[in-house]
Amino acid sequence: MDDEICPGCRARFDRCDGPTHPYIGASAACWTTYGEVLAREYEDFNEPEIHRLIVDAYAAQHPGTESRQSTQSVAIHLIGLCSRIEKGLPAKAITIQIGKAVKRGGFCWLTPPQDLGTITIRDICHATDLEDHIRRVQGWARSVWSAWQMHADTVKRWAEGL
Ligand SMILES: [Zn+2]
């Protein structure tokens, strides 16, 4: 069986030669699965609140290696997770908050945890209906956010401009 483990979420996928993202640290197969989840999200579910959570959880679970773009990407997607999970902010408010945080800048690279949680995009792509999809995405997002707990205070500071 020709398979490989995604360097971000550590899920095992059949090897695939598709494209990868320039700084999100995902294997081609994982990145393809993510694209399929987003396409289904857009076509079947169309839930902007859940969409935001998927984008944030996926990027935070695939931090990649240190660079200017990955540093900012990890920062803003962790702010997104924090604002939703800890503060319950809706997607629109999170987007505004992230815009302000990016303007302030000053992000630094957060060394990713060894373990980024056991729930991955592979669990999300098997949702049976909208309710199941929402439940899976919420569990995934909480799991990713809790994996990053050692940096939670820093992320909160960035989110609130303190
Ligand atoms: Zn992955």
Image (cartoon, grey):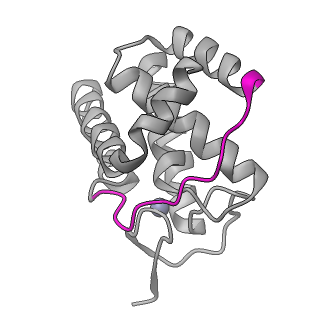
Q: Is residue 130 left or right of residue 104?
A: left
Q: Secondary structure of the magenta portion, mostly?
A: loop
> What's the magenta region?
103-117
For the C terminus, give its image quadrant. top right
Residue 119's x, y, as percent? Answer: 28, 53
Q: Is residue 107 above or below residue 115?
A: above
Query: Is residue 126 magenta-colored?
Result: no
Residue 136's x, y, as percent? Answer: 26, 38
Q: Is residue 121 left or right of residue 8?
A: left
Residue displayed at 56% across by 63% down: 26
Residue displayed at 40% across by 39% down: 152
Q: Is residue 148 above or below residue 138?
A: below
Residue 57's x, y, as percent? Answer: 44, 41
Query: Is residue 110 magenta-colored?
Result: yes
Residue displayed at 40% across by 61% down: 113
Residue displayed at 44% across by 11% down: 90
User: 44 or 23: which is nearer to us?
Assistant: 23
Residue 83's x, y, as percent? Answer: 43, 22
Q: Is residue 129 left or right of residue 44?
A: left
